[in-house]
Image (tube, rainbow, N blue to C red):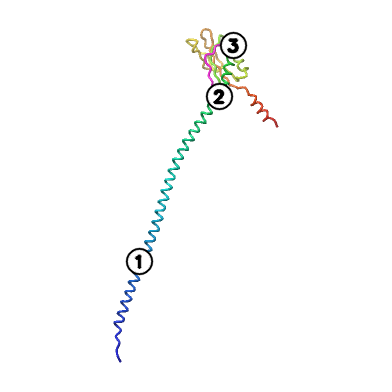
Amino acid sequence: MPRINLLPWREALRKKRQKDFVTQAGLALIGAASIALLVHVTVQGQIDHQIQRNAYLEKTVAELDVKIEEIKTLKKKRDDLVARMGAIEKLQATRGLIVMLFDELARTTPEGIVLTNVSMGEGASTVQINGFSDTTARVAEYLRGLNKSGLLDNAEIIGEGILATDSSNVGARGSQNQMRGVFDGKFAFSINAIVTPPVSKIDAEGSTEQSKP
């Protein structure tokens, strides 16, 4: 019976299997490397895209900050203009009142009283009158006349007469309802009053309409 030697065949099969294993291992390694490279490229692409988005957002935020500053500047200018317009309107509203006030002061000032200073408070709602008189009775008469004038109300003496060196700087300060300072036979006084502008015909009609049921 002839003998068949199987060793060379087994050796060839073993080498073939080793070669196949190496080939498969190489393919697996290449596949893994490809997957890793693909993941890396994908992640890096996402990172780059996010960096671009962040840069765009930063640029947009910077532009918005500039616009916000411009808006603040414009708002400040607008507020300044509104304040100026308010001041102009207030001045126009009080211009006629000042003329009426000085006309009323000239009309109600009796003989024997000299006014040295007339100053209006903020918003032209109050007025301070400084002057001197030859008698205290004239000051009391002047005070009553101011309260009856229709343009002033709650007029009251707020200061005490002080001794002055000449008639140009006579003033009044100190305790209420006192007029003891005497210069050359004259009493210095200071009066505060509330300005009550007359109600216009339009305002009166408006208030009448509002009061109707």
Q: For mark 1, what is the residue?
A: 30
Disc count in the image? 3
Q: Most extreme residue toward the top, as rendered?
A: 184
- Residue 72 position in % (x across, y down): 47, 37
Ranked by sequence position, the earlier of labels 2 and 3 is: 2
Ranked by sequence position, the earlier of labels 1 and 2 is: 1
Q: Secondary structure at mark 1?
A: helix
The three-letter code of the residue at mark 2 reads: Gln
- Asked whether 113 falls inside the magenta stretch, the response is yes
Q: For mark 3, what is the residue?
A: 110
Picture layout, residue 11 above or below residue 107 = below
The span picked out in magenta is: 111-120
Give the numbered dot on residue 92: 2
Left or right? Give the position of 44 relative to 76.
left
Ranked by sequence position, the earlier of labels 3 and 1 is: 1
Q: Main secondary structure of the magenta part?
A: strand
